[in-house]
Amino acid sequence: MDKNIYSTARFTGWMRCDICRKQIAETFLKKIVGTLVRDAKGKVHPVCFECQGKFREKDKMLSALD
């Protein structure tokens, strides 16, 4: 599995947080201000900076997605 998590999560258009559905800001280098979380099935979920602060652990982020 040689794929880069950031290249697989690149979408055309606006990226939204999977928890709160707010638009995720990007830097001038087109990097998101937040994180990408991969679940057990391998699907990548973008999470904004605010939700990343609320849910510090990966397990809590994944449980908030459901």
Image (cartoon, rainbow, N blue to C red):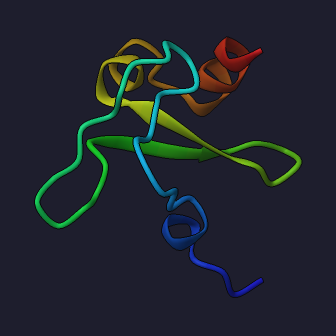
Rendered view: 1 above or below 55: below
From the top left corner, tell me how far across and down residue 16 is, in percent: 46, 31
Q: Residue at x 35, y 27 (%)?
A: 23
Q: Residue at x 48, y 27 (%)?
A: 17
Residue 14 shown left or right of residue 20 in the figure: left
Q: Residue at x 66, y 81 (%)?
A: 3
Residue 19 shown left or right of residue 55 in the figure: right
Most foreground residue, 35 or 25: 25
What is the residue that sits farthest to the right in this orientation?
41
Rendered view: 17 above or below 33: above
Quadrant location of the N terminus in the rendered image: bottom right
Q: Quadrant of residue 40?
A: top right
Rendered view: 25 above or below 17: below
Q: Residue at x 44, y 23 (%)?
A: 56
From the top left corner, tell me how far across and down residue 5 is, in percent: 57, 66
Quadrant location of the C terminus in the rendered image: top right
How many tags in the picture?
Answer: 0
What is the residue that sits farthest to the bottom in this orientation?
2
From the top left corner, tell me how far across and down residue 49 is, in percent: 30, 28
From the top left corner, tell me how far across and down residue 43 is, in percent: 76, 49
